[in-house]
Image (cartoon, helix red, strand yellow):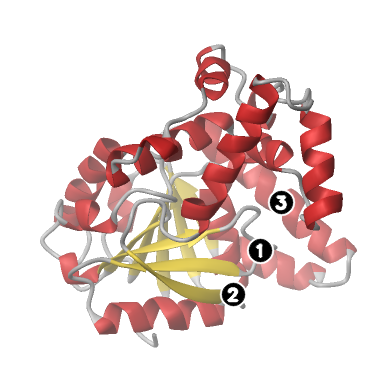
Amino acid sequence: MAMVKTVGVIGAGTMGSGIAQSFAQAGFSVRLVDVSPSMLDRARTSIDRSLAKFVEKGKLSAADRDAVLGRLSTGPAMSTLADVDYLVEAIVEDRDAKRSLFTELDALVRPDAIFASNTSSIPIGTLADATRRPDRVLGMHFMNPVPLMVLVEVIRGARTSDGSMKVAFDLCAALGKTPVESADRPGFIANRVLMPMINEAIYAVMEGVGTPEAVDTVMKLGMNHPMGPLTLADFIGLDVCLAIMRVLRDGLGDAKYTPCPLLERMVAEGKLGRKSGVGFYKY
């Protein structure tokens, strides 16, 4: 891992900004890239607020916060990633968009750099096939909010080398996170288990078994979950939940992964959860 000094992060959404912050806090030089200036501005604001909370709680000094911000640069130019040692992709959860990006990056970034995708469900082999470095492509599925959650699913593609996996595991340790290896199957471990539960909770609401509040309360108090599945779905984004369910259904070929019609309808109506201000709850 000594080779990794500069990390590139593509996509300045919630996940990308959290990933960039975590690497910068761990001492790495970070370049956060997004084609949208407004997304970059929002990411900067989000990172500033997050670091301020760490300072308020005494987990970070003001000087350390300034040092973290000094290690982080943002901009729209992909060319700034040409010489990074390690790259994390965190764009929209769309296979074709990710494949197109990986092909473009493969021609731009030095050939020995490792590419990691923060995809939550798309097979890594599909992304690796879009490059000339399949042995250096893997998955690093961070949990949200990234600066606070310690789990990282590290996904080994069919041609991912042992060396690339070791670098990813060592980076997780440097970030203070716990890596868990998953085989390259649709949904990996986390969403293979989580999303069908969320989908079934949505069916329970659609069929009048219980209100969103009732379903969430049962899972919190009866199953000791820190957050109910519908609150969590709103937090993740109902559009993301729908995309993952479709990946599970198409990739595993089993009707039990069919998205609930209510989920389909809510996404079509723009009710995406926290990001849109309304989902199963209002925000």
Sequence-first tag of 1 and 3: 3
Instruction: Determine contact: label 1, label 3, CB under 8 Å.
Output: no
Name which residue type carries label 2. Answer: Lys
Question: Residue at the top extreme?
Answer: 269
Structural crowding at the residue carrying mark 3, measured as other residues with C-alpha within 10 Å and reported as few (<14), some (14–19) or many (≥20): some
Position of residue 47 in the picture relative to residue 191 (left or right) = right
Instruction: Determine contact: label 1, label 2, CB under 8 Å.
Output: yes
Residue labelled with disc 3: 48
Name which residue type carries label 3. Answer: Asp
Q: Quadrant of residue 86?
A: bottom left
Residues at marks 2 and 3, CA–CA distance in whole angstroms: 21 Å
Residue labelled with disc 1: 149
Sequence-first tag of 1 and 2: 1
Q: Which mark is residue 177?
A: 2
Whole-percent x, y for residue 229 in the image: 69, 42
Q: Residue at x 75, y 44 (%)?
A: 228
Position of residue 68 in the picture relative to residue 125 (left or right) = right
Between 33 and 128, the one nearer to me in the picture: 128
Question: Residue at the left extreme?
Answer: 132
Q: Quadrant of residue 57?
A: bottom right
Q: Quadrant of the N terminus?
A: bottom left
Between 63 and 146, the one nearer to me in the picture: 146
Whether residue 111 is visible: no
